[in-house]
Image (cartoon, rainbow, N blue to C red):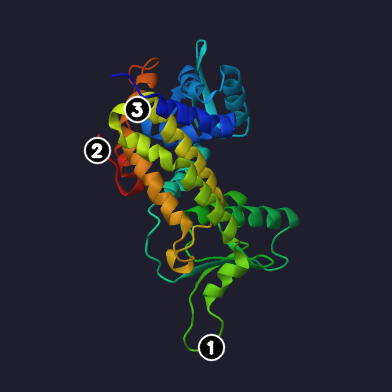
Amino acid sequence: MTTSPAPQYWTEQLIALSPPRAKSLVMTLFGDVIRPHGGALWLGSLIRLLAPFGVNDRLVRTSVFRLAEEGWLSAQREGRRSLYALSSTAARRFELAYRRIYEPASLEWDGIWTLVFAAADALNAKQRADLRRELLWEGFGSVAPMVFIHPRANHDTLDDILTRARIKSKVFVCSATQTEALEGRPLGDLIGQCWQLGAVADDYEAFTARFAPAQALLEQKKAIDPEQAFIIRTLLIHEYRRLHLHDPLLPLELLPANWAGTRAYELCRAIYSLSVERAERYILDTLRREDDHAPEAAPYFYQRFGGLLTP
């Protein structure tokens, strides 16, 4: 039986309408594909993995060169070949960032908020600007100048931010809960004040509409080959990763009813699970063209999205 043209047509249309940037796509591959398979790969393998997305070898070489200059990647030469891996600093940041991508969206909330603040003269102008940028990027809301709050902060990520900025001794970090002893506005009112969720919801709705056809294609198990499964999975995570960068990931209890992010997560989980077996076959075949010993995906890989198909 020949492969249906529908999956290839769908992926080609998606790439044509929204071509992924080479540098960003490299980052997606390292987080989603390369880390579970030993964390390093030869440049030739990376070129082959990116070719189906219309990224030529020149763009790949330029992208990894820039990422190495920026400290994200490290390179090791062996003759005429180059082996690329995440730098030790980048590996830690990737672990924290990607952990939240695959984390179930329905985790219970304990009602505790994390508060980060600094005295007016504790930080210089650059430190204030850097801290604000990093915390807003991680989904914190700004209650007042140099006062930030989040109802479900990742403390490992927060510790990493403060450590890299070398300001742990200059800021205050504490927990807050709603008190019942005194009457006041509920902390939940901060959602509308500190976070603009409308644009986030619109992005999730667009994501769901764009990728819903992929689930139907993958459910037709004979209609798709391993390469197309890999392309779908990569485009899926590449786009979903972008959404997470703008989502503060607030507890469901504080979000609007029928939150669009929940539907997007469930769709992402379904497509990832349906594509994982065939995509992994393509990934291993590609990696082992240059490295006979390229490892299978590590066991933790199959715990993504609350548990995938076992190998």
Between circles 1 and 3, the one closer to the viewer is 3
At which x and y percent is residue 286? 39, 20
Left or right: 281 as drawn, with respect to 41: left
The disc labelled 3 sits on which kind of residue?
Answer: Ile
Q: Which residue is mark 3?
A: 224
Q: Is residue 14 visible?
A: yes
Question: Tag on residue 183?
Answer: 1
The answer to whether any part of residue 93 appears in the image is no
Residue 114 position (above or below residue 227): below
- Of 174 and 261, nearer the camera is 261
Are circles 2 and 3 on residues that touch, CB within 8 Å?
Answer: no
Q: Residue at x 70, y 55 (%)?
A: 129
Task: Give the quadrant of the N terminus.
Answer: top left
Query: Percent x, y for residue 9?
Result: 46, 27
Residue 293: x and y in percent read: 33, 20
Name the residue at 60% across, 18% down: 58
Looking at the image, residue 65 lies above or below residue 232: above
Mark pair 1, 2: CA separation: 52 Å
Under circle 3, the secondary element is loop
